[in-house]
Amino acid sequence: MITFEGAAKHYPDGTVAVAGLDLTVESGRTTVFVGPSGSGKTTSLRMVNRMVAPTSGTVLVDGEDVRSQDPARLRRSIGYVIQQAGLFPHRTVRDNIATVPLLLGWGRSRARARAAELMESVGLEPSQAKRYPHQLSGGQQQRVGVARALAADPPILLMDEPFSAVDPVVRTGLQDELLRLQAELRKTVLFVTHDIDEAIRIGDRIAVFGPGGELAQYDTPERLLTHPVDDFVESFIGYDRGVRRLAFFPANELALREDVLLDDQDTVERALNTVDTAGQPWALVVDAQRMPLGWVDVDRLRHEPSGLELGRLTLTAYGHTFDVERDSLRAALDAAVLSPAGRAVGVDPDGRVLGVVSQADLGNAIWSVS
């Protein structure tokens, strides 16, 4: 557990980086510090490993004041990941990861075995062990940085905007990897970001910092979205916070329609007999394995030859699907909004269609949880 008791950082020119922070970071959870530039979030994080010394107040790790500990020993006991990885350019991937274990006196073979184990854990290939940082992509370098921070199995992991220098697709993948690792390892993670979406996605608790290094709100992601304490927090979160909140509600309770699924081997006549009774303007054509092929406009069917098989029609793209068991209401709403038919296609983990849901039905489901 990390405890800030009135921890403040003032500079001689009068600048206030952190204004008396009182906050407890729970063990085994991910706590995110978020806020605009200059709000004190990185300074607060660096107080934990004594890279920044508070001018007043105290920072405790498991009840012990960090100022009473040797800085080098303290830093070796805490994992630290920074933006753009901060790898040693002259060391291989394997030796970068093995750095802290070697400093702690591990034998080289043991340290390298640990590095190989962690490379697998963070999604790196064994063949990359002898490469140098410049031979890796930005996302791969960040994975090495995470592996290095975990090498000595520290109970605390400090992450200072670790994913901000990579593109959005890589960033999402790294967030997924962190969530997976945290579910397995249950480290005490203190994560700094300026991105509220990233904070909401990975944080168990979120601390929003405001101008002047003041802590504006410390709460769970869901409560932060539903009950911002003031105008600053509300504006920082953004006025689409209602949509963001949908990420906390699973899609597996949605009522999906199966009566508008048509087999691609059906004829137009059989299809019209099916969808007419459902009263739907659109139907989804699937193959024999229930994989989605595309939407068909029911009105258009009435002008096609009755014996024509649906698989021979030019279909409207179905957009992207949502996983009924794994995704949230937000993912379902996104799929419906982007669908040409205004309907979301729900699938199982193998991509087979379970049913469809309209924007109107989604609206009713969202209303029931708001």
Image (spheres, grey):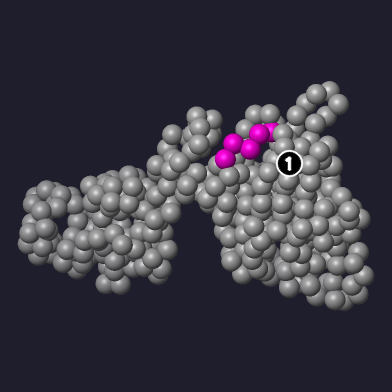
Furthest-top residue in view? 13
Amino acid carrying label 1: it is Gly
Q: Position of residue 92 (x, y in %)?
A: 84, 61
Please, what secondary structure does the residue beneath circle 1 have? strand
The secondary structure that dominates the magenta segment is strand
Residue 154: image location, x then y, percent? 76, 64
**Is residue 110 positioned above or below 137 on the image?**
below
Q: Is residue 12 left or right of residue 4?
A: right
Q: Which is nearer the eye, 329 or 172? A: 329
Residue 63 image-quadrant placement: bottom right
Task: Determine the residue positioned at 80% across, 75% down.
Answer: 113
Q: Is residue 59 left or right of residue 250?
A: right
Q: How many marks?
A: 1
Horizontal side of residue 249 vs 192, given as left or right: left
Seen in the picture, residue 69 relative to 5 is either above or below; the reply is below
User: For the N terminus, which image quadrant?
Assistant: bottom right
Residue 72 visible in rendering: no
Q: For mark 1, does the 10 Å Cα neighbourhood hold few (<14), some (14 to 19), or many (20 or more) residues? A: some
Give the residue drawn at x 47%, y 47%.
Answer: 223
Residue of label 1: 6
Q: Nearer the viewer, residue 141 or 226?
A: 226
Out of 270 and 61, give the one closest to the viewer: 61
Is residue 215 on the magenta stretch? yes
What segment carries the magenta color? Answer: 213-217
Residue 4 in percent (x, y) is at: 72, 47
What residue is drawn where x is 87% and y is 76%?
109
Residue 220 seen by the camera? yes
Q: Report whether 269 appears left or right of 75.
A: left
Q: What residue sits 50% from the left and 29% below the top?
A: 231
Magenta run includes residue 35: no
Q: Nearer the viewer, residue 252 or 61?
A: 61
